[in-house]
Image: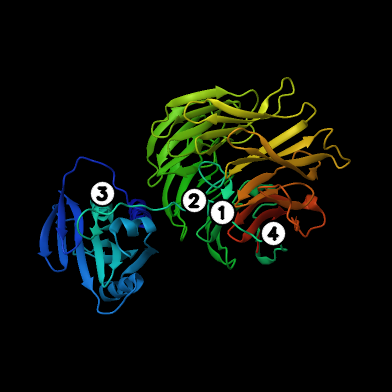
């Protein structure tokens, strides 16, 4: 019983922490328009007070909740946060403030106001039967000109799920103004955050960042975290996510949140072993606790509180991927699509999937890797197969979606010539172009990224053209997205063996990391020319003692995560 109550609280907090979008259903609702406000309330509520000047009160017909809509007028300019603090101090003395956040640009435009914020409160009461009860209040604050608008709902904690859809209907329909509701146009700010493995659901590895590589970057902060095990490899693969100015990562059995600007710890949470990347989307942090029975977790990113858990079927699974309210994960050999808010299954399809290649998603399509060498494109809403195509060799990395293209890199086949980079029309599987390699190229590994009409790839090769005493060379190449023609190529570094490496695109920059020559390589995206400053990977002279977990570019910062012996270091350079 206690567990269910806890879940109810965080479901309420979750609803208020993200955009509320009501599901379409057949319930009827009544429209109200008065005093410049417009809203709808569904059939389960009765209007018990209607002050044409400034207030509406609605009671649920089963007497389990009350909704208040109140208009305030201010004689002096006021901020929406001051509005919220004034209400809190006058109405919620003795209540616990569970959650606060600013309104999103979408919510502000949807309500046709100038600013908004959200708050959730909780209070413990002792009823007449001497039983402990908890009341919850959720409030939306809006500000436009000299007027403030407050939407408030109060209910018992265990009854929240019964009135949740009603309140969503109210919030989604509420707006201020006369005539027709203005069209909601919000420019999506893509590419500023590292939300998941591959940067986004489409695996673009394209970030809007601008570190100044014309100068030597200085260390802004560094944290060293002692692992709980002797084997530092236990932390390998726990790549961080970076969202809203905070970095989230896992060391051994703990997840940590740190501020990017100051390097201060926000919180930590013991989760057990995690060997897949994190995912942070719409204020919720997702990860999978490893074990004989793996468990998917959803946490509030602000404080680490658990929203829900979901058990997976077996020990083999992919990184979690979230896009447009759906969470996708390969569980064993099948693909699962879940409601990202609740963990409820939407659909699943049984394929023979490779769990090492996570799903790649855009608005309409999910791209999967089957049996190591086959690409499947299926419908994002049903999982039904649209097309599948067998490659000429093993798929190296998860595919990548860019506009209407699916880009796939495959391993070199020593028995027959193959295109190692292949671009297909995502709608029908038509092959647009492919990139082959020289016959004398050996031991090739290839990672790809995209940006502004180009495909960028980093190869590890050994050939007559680049043969040196140092061993294999790493080669970065740029190709035209439309035709696959070579734009430029640049040899960089060397590798003693095929290494872990990565490539990303940031504005006019191509950034390569992971070479064993102890350097990162920032290159001009248009010309391939290197910047004048090469960045030392580590101050440790013996590079073999340090293992790069990953490198991230974020705004004007370079963030590197490394492990040495039983210590994980996270360093922010600027």
- Judged from this view, the residue extending furthest toward the top is 415
Q: Position of residue 321 (x, y in %)?
A: 49, 42
Q: Position of residue 356 (x, y in %)?
A: 59, 35
Mark 4: few/some/many CA within 10 Å (<14, 14-19, 20+): many
Q: For marks 3 and 2, give the CA distance.
A: 29 Å
Residue pointed to by mark 2: 190
Residue on which disc 1 sits: 208
Mark 2 residue crowding within 10 angstroms, few (<14) / some (14–19) / many (20+)? few
The CA distance from mark 4 to mark 2 is 23 Å
In the drawing, what numbered circle is on residue 213? 4
Q: Measure how far apart labels 1 and 3 are at the Cα level.
A: 37 Å
Q: Using the image, determine if residue 172 lies above or below residue 292.
A: below
N-terminal of the pair, mark 4 or mark 2, is 2
Please, what secondary structure does the residue beneath circle 2 have? loop
Residue lying at 43% horizontally and 46% vertically, measured from the top left: 309
Residue at which label 3 appears: 165
At mark 1, the secondary structure is: loop
Q: CA distance from mark 2 to mark 1?
A: 8 Å
Q: Looking at the image, is mark 4 or mark 1 earlier in the sequence? A: 1
Q: Residue 76: x and y, percent?
A: 28, 79
Task: Using the numbered discs, state the Cα–Cα distance from disc 4 to disc 1 in whole angstroms.
Answer: 15 Å
Q: Is residue 197 left or right of residue 396?
A: left
Q: Earlier in the sequence, mark 3 or mark 2?
A: 3
Point 53% across, 34% down: residue: 405
Task: Choose between 447 and 425: the one closer to the eye.
Answer: 425
Q: Secondary structure at mark 3?
A: helix
Sequence-wise, the earlier of marks 1 and 3 is: 3
Q: Is residue 314 above or below residue 109?
A: above
């Amino acid at each position: 019983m206690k567990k269910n109550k806890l879940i109810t609280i965080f479901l309420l907090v979750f609803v208020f922490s993200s955009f509320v979008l009501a599901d379409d259903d057949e319930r009827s609702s009544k429209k109200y328009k008065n005093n410049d406000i417009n809203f709808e309330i569904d059939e389960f509520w009765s209007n018990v007070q209607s002050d044409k000047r400034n207030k509406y009160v609605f009671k649920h017909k089963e007497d389990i909740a009350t909704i208040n809509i109140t208009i305030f007028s201010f004689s002096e300019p006021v901020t929406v946060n001051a509005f919220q603090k004034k209400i809190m101090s006058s109405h919620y003395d003795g209540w616990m403030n569970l959650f606060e956040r600013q309104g999103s640009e979408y919510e502000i435009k949807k309500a046709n106001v100038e600013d908004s914020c959200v708050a959730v409160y909780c209070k413990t009461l002792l009823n007449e039967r001497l039983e402990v009860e908890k009341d919850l209040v959720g409030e939306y604050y809006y500000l436009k000109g000299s007027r403030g608008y407050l939407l408030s709902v109060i209910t018992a904690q265990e009854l929240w799920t019964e009135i949740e859809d009603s309140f969503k209907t109210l919030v989604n329909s509420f707006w201020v103004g006369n005539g027709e509701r203005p069209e909601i146009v919000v420019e999506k700010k893509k590419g500023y955050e590292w939300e998941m493995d591959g940067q986004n659901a489409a695996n673009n590895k394209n970030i809007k960042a601008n570190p100044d590589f014309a100068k030597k970057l200085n260390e802004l902060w560094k944290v060293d975290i002692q692992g709980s095990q002797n084997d530092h490899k236990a932390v390998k693969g726990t790549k961080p996510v970076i969202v809203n100015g905070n970095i989230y990562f896992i060391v051994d059995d703990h997840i940590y949140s740190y501020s990017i600007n100051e390097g201060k710890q926000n919180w930590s949470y013991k989760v057990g072993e995690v060997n897949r990347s994190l995912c942070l989307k719409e204020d919720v942090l997702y990860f999978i606790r490893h074990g004989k029975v793996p468990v998917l977790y959803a946490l509030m990113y602000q404080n680490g509180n658990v929203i829900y858990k979901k058990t997976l079927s077996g020990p083999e699974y992919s990184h979690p991927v979230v896009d447009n309210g759906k969470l996708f994960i390969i569980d064993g050999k099948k693909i699962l699509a879940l409601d990202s808010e609740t963990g409820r299954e939407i659909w699943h399809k049984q394929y023979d999937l490779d769990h090492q290649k996570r799903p790649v998603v855009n608005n309409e399509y999910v791209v999967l890797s089957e049996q190591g060498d086959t690409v499947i494109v299926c419908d994002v809403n049903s999982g039904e197969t649209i097309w599948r195509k067998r490659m000429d060799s093993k798929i190296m990395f998860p595919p990548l979606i860019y506009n209407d293209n699916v880009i796939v890199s495959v391993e070199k086949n020593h028995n027959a010539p193959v295109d190692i980079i292949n671009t297909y029309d995502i709608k029908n599987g038509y092959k647009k172009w492919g990139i082959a390699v020289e016959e004398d190229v050996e031991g090739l590994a290839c990672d790809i990224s995209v940006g502004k009409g180009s495909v960028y790839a980093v190869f590890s090769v050994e050939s007559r053209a680049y043969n040196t005493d140092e061993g294999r060379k790493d080669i970065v190449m740029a190709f035209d997205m439309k035709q696959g023609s070579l734009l430029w190529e640049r040899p960089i570094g060397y590798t003693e063996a095929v290494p872990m490496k990565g490539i990303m695109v940031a504005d006019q920059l191509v950034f390569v990391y992971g070479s064993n020559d102890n350097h990162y390589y920032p290159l001009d995206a248009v010309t391939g020319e290197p910047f004048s400053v090469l960045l030392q990977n580590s101050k440790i002279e013996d590079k073999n003692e340090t293992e790069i977990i990953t490198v991230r570019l974020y705004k004007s910062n370079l963030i590197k995560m490394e492990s040495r012996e039983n210590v994980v270091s996270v360093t922010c350079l600027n």
